[in-house]
Amino acid sequence: MPNEHRTSPHRLSDPLSDSLETLGLDPAQTALYTAVLRLHRATRTELAQAMDGSVEKVGRQLDDLVRLGVVDERSGEYLARHPAAALGRVIAQRLDRLAEESRRIDSALGSIRGLIHDYDAGHDYQNGRFPVELVSGADVLYESVVGMAVQSPPMALLIAIPDERTMTDFAHKFADPWIDAQQRGLLTVQTVVPVSTLALPGVRDQLTRLVETGGQARTLDRVPSWFMTAGTETAGLPALWGGNLPDHAYNFYLVRTPIVTGVLRTLFHELWGRAVPLPWGRKGDGMVRVLRLAAQGMCDDSIARQLGVSVRTVRARFAEAMAELGAQSRFHAGVEAARRGWLG
């Protein structure tokens, strides 16, 4: 072999060695890879001579380069792959590993929040009774929520409303301050209400405004009790679990501790997962209209003429309604829609 083909790790620049080491090549492998590039095609013996090393040692390093995918072996000869393709593949694999490591780190960071709640719960337990405040009056309730939101915006307010009286009071007296606070970015409201309350005067308008300003609302056949959570550390509990607020003159308890709030947030999300979306909005209104006209005895052609759409669109909306209501037939969909107050 001519001397000009001999390669040694000492002849490599440190920046090259350092950069390829990041990709998994140690200095010796980097030197050998450079030799393969310069010779382009060579046997183990020829490469050992170029490296001033033993055939056995160079052979082990060549096997590593083949596994990394930067060198090909064919019939006892080693061929250099183009660096852009070879190192591009190595870089892609390295990026995949970094992405997976990043996901694991994000998961670990996410778990810290749960550990913090456990720490706070233990701290509360060791330091005596939970701080509990008795609150009286509807005005105090609605003003307290806005006050807490002002202190730590944007505050997530989760609230379960179990009865028509509380929902009527909300719609006619107290929804406006919360919707205004939501518009100003102070809080976001997420609520579960009984489906029977949708037919109450003013409820649809206020829930529509609530949703349009960034809130969320769903319905259940029955909501087990009034309760709320304000952020992650404050919860509202009724005077009697299973009851509502008007029956107890709007007396309720504010409990300021993460452990109780966490339990109620979990309960709320369980109810939310079982609840169904409101039966209006652009998609919902179309479903409700065809169901209402069908309930009046109109056929698909008549419904299409009445709404100014095609028969195909009418049938598509029936299919959407059946899927939304979990119904097996149009008749079943009509019964379920009536039960949920969609036709009122």
Image: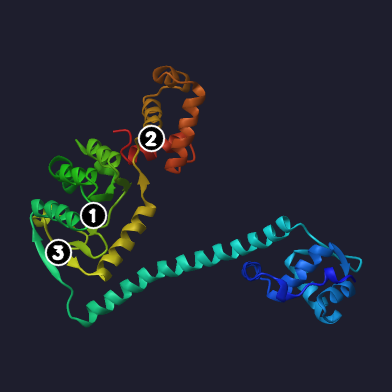
- The answer to which of 147 and 164 lies nearer the viewer is 147
The secondary structure type at the circle numbered 1 is loop
- Residue at the spot of label 1: 153
Position of the N terminus by quadrant: bottom right
- Residue at the spot of label 3: 253
Left or right of residue 5, residue 113 in this image = left
Q: Residue at x 24, y 65 (%)?
A: 233
Q: Is residue 72 visible?
A: no
Please tell me which of labels 2 and 3 falls first in the chain.
3
Q: Residue at x 59, y 61 (%)?
A: 95
Q: What type is the residue that disc 1 sits on?
A: Pro
- Mark closer to the observer (3, 1): 1
Please tell me which of labels 1 and 2 falls first in the chain.
1
Left or right of residue 18, residue 80 in this image = right
Label 2–label 3 contact, CB within 8 A: no
Above or below, 178 relative to 49: above
